[in-house]
Image (cartoon, grey):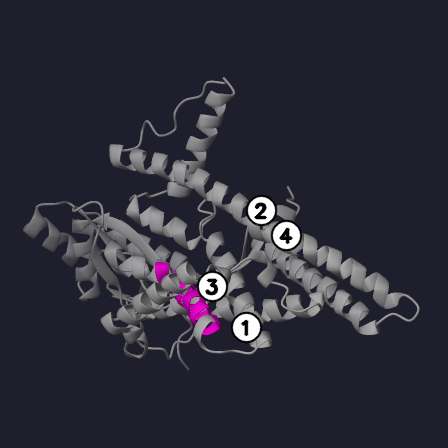
Amino acid sequence: MADTPVSSSTVDIGQDTVLRLHPLAFRDSDDDPDQVVVGRADTGEFVEVPRVGADAVRLLGEGLTVRGVADRIDREQDVALDVAELVEALLELGFATAVDGLAVAEPADVPRAHLPWLRERHVRWLFGRTATVVWCAVVAAAAVTWWRRPELVPEASDFYWTPYVGLAVLVNTALFSVSLSVHELMHLAAARSYGAPARIGFSTRLHYLVVQTDVTAIWSVPRRRRFRVYLAGLRSDAFVVAGCALLAAHAGLPAGARGLVAALALVVLLSMTIQLQVYMRTDLYYVLMEWLHGRNLFQDGLSYVRYLRSRLSRRPAADPTVDLPAGERRGVRVYAVAMALGSVVTLTGFGLFGLPILVEGIAGAAVGLVEGLAPGGNPMRALDSALIILIEGTLQVIFLVTFYRGHRHWFTRRHG
């Protein structure tokens, strides 16, 4: 019978200890030439360590003892390194598979990658030169089509392509779900094009229920390559919206099909505007984080906005960015402006699209329910109106359950 893996916290580290490591990724830091990023792509656990520490990790991976690594580093780099402490840190991070021949248990919360069979060779073509040329051609053709036929530009009235409000909401929800799945799968495919695993799951952002792809593993690749992963979903969305415009203009579709295509373009466009809400951790937030080289852009940006608000209310407070390096300080201030612009775009989008859709949906459902239940009324109208209530109620229940699971500690009573 195989030995039971031991907990990393119970392992004794000595000078003759030999460590066996998981496959680790090493790359130079994006911001500090003296630092190296080390981590496990399969779990998304990464740390930034001094270059001498990364050299020590490599030597440990080659099978040298703690003493052997310390002597080698001292001899070659004239640095006295506490290798035993480094080994303890590697164990806590889950980087080791065995210590002195004893298997080490994996952390209980190690996530599993989705679609593990999907390989780099399967998806690399999606982001190659040919695919990019096709994407640019389709988007450019759609732009010309909208300029020549502005009635094809998505508008709020496209949402209700049928007098049955509930049916429109049901079908549009299905269309949105499919497009959202494609959006997230493109993030996963982009990560996999670099050989990095990814996972898709539910989460919440403020009052939104969202599907998101965990692509933490792409920290194993340089910054310039990570942009592909962050922008893959929006690139897919833009292709869908542009394709819908070309279909509506040139495919000779019947009226019903044109209505569905217009509705698809609208719901995908609305999902794209959500990405502009960089005050949440949207795709474009991560793009800004990389572009501005922000280590903790979200929290620093919120602190700076609170500081600006205190100045407007004449309650002076210390500028939270004064201790940041000059580059990060500029980045935080640019991010604060982006937060404001994102809020303006969000409110504008809600006024142009969200509010009219909401008002028409509520009014249509109310009228349909009353008329359908009245003597001699159309029961299909009542059923249709009940359907929209069921769909929206189900989405809210899913949101509440997901929010509770992600914030269970808020609702758990602390004892003692």
Mark 4 residue element: helix
Does 220 lie within the magenta span? no
Q: How many marks?
A: 4
Instruction: Give left or right: position of 391 versus 88.
Output: right
The vertical placement of 86 against 119, above or below, is above
First in sequence: mark 1 vs mark 3: 3
Position of residue 139 measured from the top left corner of the image (x, y, whole percent)? 36, 65
- Label at residue 200: none
Relative placement, left or right, of 150 versus 387 is left
Whether 234 is among the magenta residues is yes
The residue that disc 4 covers is 356
10 Å neighbourhood of mark 4: few (<14), some, or many (≥20)? some
Among the two numbered marks 3 and 2 on one chain, the one whose residue lies closer to the N terminus = 3
* Upstream in sequence: badge 4 or badge 2: 2
How far across and how far down the image is residue 90, in percent? 31, 56
Whichever of labels 4 and 1 marks the residue nearer the N terminus, that label is 1
Residue matched to label 1: 258
Q: Is residue 246 visible?
A: yes
Give the amino acid at mark 4. Pro
Q: CA distance from mark 1 to mark 3?
A: 50 Å
Amino acid type of disc 2? Gly
Q: Is residue 336 left or right of residue 405?
A: left
Query: Looking at the picture, which amino acid does disc 1 mark?
Result: Arg
**Which residue corresponds to mark 2?**
351
Separation of marks 2 and 1 at Cα, in angstroms? 25 Å
The amino acid type found where label 3 is placed reads Ala
Residue under numbered circle 3: 108
Magenta segment: 231-248
